[in-house]
Image: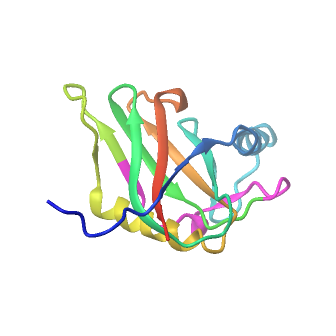
Amino acid sequence: MAEDGPKQPQLSMPLVLDQDLTRQMRLRVESLKLRGGRRQDGEKLLQPAEAMYRLDFVRQQKLQFERWDVVLDKPGKVTITGTSQNWTPDLTNLMTRQLLDPTAIFWRREDSAAMDWNEADALEFGERLADLAKIRKVMYFLITFGEGLEPADVKASVVFNQL
């Protein structure tokens, strides 16, 4: 079957664990515990099974979302939530209103090598990322690891078509 035209060049952009930001957010949790303090109204505290990731856009550009590439080295589940926050080193409080909907959920069952995902939400989320690529230099994500997964077990990237 003949193709409809030349293929658009693709750009695979990995989500990279931001260890410094994750550490700062964990320090916030520890600080509150030590002081017996309470979180701010609406503040989302980083849980032990969560970490912050980033996606660096090489330059602001028009991109078209193609697909998610998520690989889980073992059975389990990850939830990828985007944030609307542009982080600075001294601003580490994550507020629940900064978490974007929808989330992308990926999982692998114990008896399967195939990945499953919530396709409609993941596609909508990917399309929002393509829109944000026009104005952002970096995008941050909260990744929640479930069922025994940890950062070393997950590789995630977003594939875009370059326009």
Number of marks: 0
> Magenta: predominant secondary structure element?
loop
- Please report the bounds of the magenta region as a residue range: 88-105
Quarter of the rendering containing residue 56: bottom right
Pick the front one: 85 or 64? 64
Q: Position of residue 80 (x, y in %)?
A: 47, 51
Residue at x 32%, y 28% (from the top left corner): 75
Q: Is residue 118 left or right of residue 12?
A: left
User: Farthest residue in the right direction?
Assistant: 90
Residue 91 visible in the picture: yes
Instruction: Decide: is 51 above or below 135.
Output: above
Name the residue nearer the viewer: 48 or 78.
78
Q: Is residue 87 magenta?
A: no
Q: Position of residue 29 (x, y in %)?
A: 71, 43
Question: Where is residue 2, by image quadrant?
Answer: bottom left
Q: How are the colours assigned in the image?
A: rainbow
Query: Where residue 53 sits: x, y (%)?
Result: 61, 46
Q: Quadrant of the N terminus?
A: bottom left
Q: Residue at x 57, y 53 (%)?
A: 141
Q: Residue at x 39, y 32 (%)?
A: 72
The image shows residue 141, relative to residue 146, as above or below, that is below
User: Can I make out residue 102 in this image?
Assistant: no
Residue visible at 72% across and 64% down in the picture: 86
Percent from the top left, x then y, of residue 30? 74, 38
